[in-house]
């Protein structure tokens, strides 16, 4: 009898934003798995820390930060093999995922490797997008409005075209692309409508208008741009 | 001393997908508020039902379903007044919101009316988008991919242009627009990549490929279209 793999979304960082279902799965887990930045700590594990019972078996996927894809994919190969061994021995495995497992999350690499031969249940989580909107006080979309989610590393021209074609835009992973993104938003004359949020829901969260944002942004930062969610018109 | 208004996201329907924070706020609430379709039941209240304590004061906003905006806005005017009265008497009010309060939710109408004069905390929830992706087994976005969220009522040409400009698309509120949307996706040659999900996470949930979807879709239905989230390439 094979075990089941659960990919559980943990939300943006505040343990209070974990769902009841993910909480229960983590508390009852005998085997957990999670990614960590090579040598460093795991953000996913830190969100779930209070729910993890002592003596649980931990599969750590040490994912190197690299522009090349090879090293990270090798880490997922190794992690998938370890998870597979646990599933084959009849144990369930709970894989911890910051945010939502299928929304810019690394869980999809594990999912792709194991979905053909194993039962996998994905438990959705609160994404950083709605968490940032909540903290910034900016409704994302109403009625027939379009919302576009864009990763910050996209080229400036691509960002410009996509920002023009939506009422609301969330730009993820701002980080070292802050200057470029600021430039695009400034050229479009939309700086006044843009909010900047970093490390949402964590103790050191920062929320401010884009024009007051710092010069340097961490990886976990976002810009939310609303041209006028319906009730504000 | 004025009360605080909490807009709490409840997730897509399964009470297990409520966050720990929203659960606690609802359990401890002395006054709750929620929308209901005129005369009918409240979906939001049904998701939270097991958490609502007996004797709690309930503010019901009876929102008529209408293409005209006036009647619904009048309902929000009345609801906001009732919430305001509770806040002025020093009571906190917990407003129940299906999904996420700022993601196509009616809470933003209450927020717009009260944010200037009252303290409001928005608690994000799991959106139907990531819940549908989880159930359909379709990762939404990875790395530098763009995700666009489109409401089904948009004109066909608008849908076509926006679908072309993103790797992943979630089309919300499919309902009576199913035939039109199917046509657009068919013309783009993307039917094979599209999944149809209705009433996600509820006991009568339906998940299938778009080509096998029924002729009629309920309001709470979605199409997820992925042209190739990264790990699948």
Image: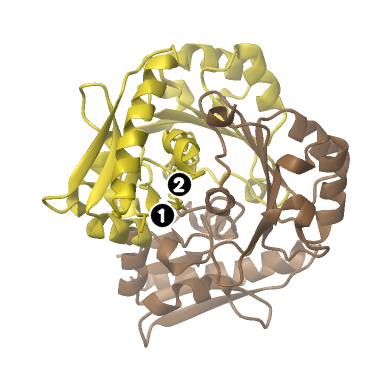
Chain colours: A yellow, B brown
How far across and down, in percent of the image, does residue A230 sit? 67, 48
Q: Residue B23 lies in what quarter of the image? A: bottom left
Q: Could you tell me which quadrant the N terminus of chain A lies in?
A: bottom left
Callout 2 secondary element: helix
Q: Nearer the viewer, residue A49 or B212?
A: B212
Measure the alpha-carbon separation of dots 2 and 1: 7 Å
Task: Identify residue for label 1.
Answer: B123
Res A214 visible: no
Residue displayed at 46% across by 51% down: A124
Q: Residue B30 lies in what quarter of the image? A: bottom left
Q: Could you tell me which quadrant the C terminus of chain A lies in?
A: top right
Q: Nearer the viewer, residue B24 or A7?
A: A7
User: Label 2 crowding class (10 Å Cα cut-off): few <14, some 14-19, many 20+?
Assistant: many
Q: Residue furthest bottom?
A: B55
How far across and down, in percent of the image, does residue A176 sit? 42, 14
Q: Nearer the viewer, residue A8 or A15?
A: A8
Residue displayed at 35% across by 52% down: A17
Q: Chain of mark 2?
A: A
Kindly indicate whether the residues beneath marks 2 and 1 are on one polypeptide chain: no
How far across and down, in percent of the image, does residue A44 sit? 30, 39
Q: Chain of mark 1?
A: B
Callout 1 secondary element: strand
Q: Give above or below for A116 relative to B5.
A: above
Disc 2 + disc 1, Cβ < 8 Å = yes
Q: Give above or below for B222 relative to B150.
A: below
Q: Residue furthest left?
A: A54
């Amino acid at each position: 009898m094979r075990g089941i793999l659960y990919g559980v979304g943990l939300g943006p960082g505040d343990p209070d934003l974990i769902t009841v279902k993910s909480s229960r799965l983590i508390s009852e887990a005998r085997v957990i798995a999670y990614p960590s930045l090579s040598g460093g700590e795991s953000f996913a594990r830190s969100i779930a820390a209070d729910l993890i019972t002592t003596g649980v078996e931990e599969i750590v996927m040490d994912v190197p930060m690299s522009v090349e894809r090879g090293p990270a994919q090798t880490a997922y190969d190794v992690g998938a093999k370890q998870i597979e061994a646990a599933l084959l021995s009849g144990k369930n495995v709970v894989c911890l995922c910051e945010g939502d497992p299928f929304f810019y999350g690394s869980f999809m690499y594990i999912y792709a490797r194991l979905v053909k031969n194993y039962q996998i249940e994905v438990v959705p989580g609160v994404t950083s997008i709605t968490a940032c909107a909540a903290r910034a006080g900016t409704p994302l979309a109403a009625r027939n409005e379009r919302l576009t989610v864009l990763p910050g590393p996209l080229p400036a021209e691509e960002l410009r075209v996509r920002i023009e074609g939506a009422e609301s835009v969330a730009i993820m992973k701002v980080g070292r692309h802050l200057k470029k993104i600021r430039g695009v938003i400034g050229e479009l004359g939309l700086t006044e409508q843009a909010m900047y949020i970093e490390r949402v829901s964590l103790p050191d969260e920062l929320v401010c208008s884009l024009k007051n944002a710092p010069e340097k942004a961490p990886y976990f930062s976002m810009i939310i741009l609303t041209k006028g969610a319906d009730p504000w018109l």
